Every structure is written in structure tokens, then in C-alpha cells.
Amino acid sequence: MRKPIVAGNWKMHKTAEEAVDLAQAIAPLVAPSLTSCDVVLCPTYTSLGAVHGVIGGSGIGLGAQNMHWEGEGAYTGDISPAMILTSGCAYVILGHSERRQYALESDEMINRKTLAALAAGLTPIVCIGEQLEQREAGRVEEIVIGQVRAALEDVEVDRAPSIVLAYEPVWAIGTGKTATAGQAEEVHALIRSFLTERFGREAADAMRIQYGGSVKAENAEELFSQENIDGGLIGGAALQADSFAAIVKAAK
């Protein structure tokens, strides 16, 4: 019922020239999977236009890694929804744990960005996830559902299916550690249950929830086979065409 979505978050990697090379390598490898899986590439701001030149019209989506909630203004170093759109983007990653940690982004800021993305016609990929000490203290549901609730405040039920959630346990991002398929599914099911309470079953069943956190070709199929896991937000493995394509192929 839900079409899987696999997005590659390239983070602060690749110059524009290098990004073009990677996009050119990825495009033919993932092309056979585009009927059964949405594929999104998220390079740096400076490479958006260049990557769009490679994948525009291919069926592969383009996404930015962040944005401001305002349309314009005195926000040095930021980028607006309109700027993202005119670069060819249809998606934007919001609330990544690295933004929460290094840029001190709050739940309120992420909510404002989510609402602004929806208003602009962008599909927000909203990240949530607990830190290791929070998991060990038994606070997973409190932290994760708290983040989801805050991010979706004031979102109307008819807009909910336009949002992609990405559950990324912070302790598994870039560490080589991965939640077991059972651990990941347990949290995804908790999120789905909350979405059902918040929006009703029809909208909740239509919303896609990705898993992120050291997803590799070797574990992707097991993770993606879980009932409530609808693809992945991929970090390091997205920087190699072969590994990313293998992950995409695992999303059926």
C-alpha cells in the first residue's frame, strides 16, 4: 500500500563536480527500481543545480538537507523554500540529529520548517530519534513520540500523508551500529500508533516512515521487510553508487 522511499543524505560531502559524477553513476543503477520505490538524492546546497541537471526527468527525486522557515529575510547562511524549489527540489530533510546537535535546532524550529515546507509544496523528510543514554534509560517512546508530536503540531490531516518521517536512533548514525530489525520495527510501530491517534487510521496508514542509522546493503532487506518500515534515509552508504543501488533494490 505504501511505496517505499530511499533517500541518500550526502551530508557535507562532494563538490559539485564530484556530485555530478556520483549522480551519473547512481542513475542507471537505480532506474529499474523506480516503479516500485521512490529514490531521492540529497546533495549539498552548492550541488543541487548540478545534480538536478543529471537526474531531472529521470524519475529520481532531488532533496535539500535543510531550509529556513521564512521565505526571505536577514538570515545569513540560510536558504528558503523557494530557493530549494527553483533548484529542482521536491524534498527537504528537516530535523536531522546533526542539525539538532550542532545547530541547536529545537522542536519548535523543526515544526515551523515542516509547516513551511508543506506550504511551499515540498515533501519534508522529518527526522526523529533517541540518544543512547535515553534508550538505556527506557525513554525511547517518550523522546521519539515527543519529537513526532512537536514536529506535526498544526499539521492538518489532509497534509499528513505528504510528510515522510525518518526514525534515526542517534546512537546508530555513522557509528556502524544498527538497531536490529526488531528494535527498529518496534519504534516504527509506536510511531504508526501515534499517527493513528493523531490523524486517524487512513492517514496514518498512508504516511511513510523510513529507518536510518548505518543501513547497508547487507542489512537493508531485513530492515525493509518489516511491516512499518517504508525504506531508508541513507548516510555513508549513499556515497557509493553500488552500495546505494543495492539498498534501493532491497526496498520492495
Image: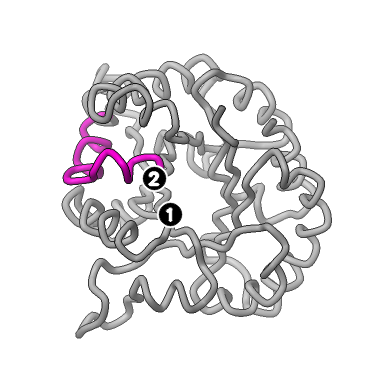
The label shown at residue 165 is none
Q: Which residue type does callout 2 highlight? A: Ile
Label 1: which secondary element:
strand
The magenta stretch spans which residues? 145-162
Label 1 to label 2, Cα distance in Å? Answer: 6 Å
* Dot 1 crowding, Cα within 10 Å, few <14, some 14–19, many 20+: many
Residue 36 horizontal/vertical position (percent): 70, 38
Q: Is residue 246 above or below residue 241?
A: above
Residue 66 horizontal/vertical position (percent): 39, 63
Work out whether residue 120 can be spotted: yes
Q: Nearer the viewer, residue 172 or 42?
A: 42
Q: Is residue 174 above or below residue 169?
A: below
Q: Nearer the viewer, residue 195 or 145?
A: 195
Q: Residue at x 38, y 50 (%)?
A: 96
The label shown at residue 123 is 1
Q: Which residue type does callout 1 highlight? A: Thr
Work out whether residue 140 can be spotted: no
Residue 166 horizontal/vertical position (percent): 44, 40
Label 2: which secondary element:
loop
Please check the rendered image and state whether residue 152 is part of the magenta-colored stretch, yes or no.
yes
The label shown at residue 163 is 2
Q: Residue at x 54, y 18 (%)?
A: 227
1 and 2 marks in contact (CB < 8 Å): yes
Residue 65 horizontal/vertical position (percent): 45, 62
Please check the rendered image and state whether residue 36 is part of the magenta-colored stretch, yes or no.
no
Q: Is residue 204 above or below residue 14?
A: above
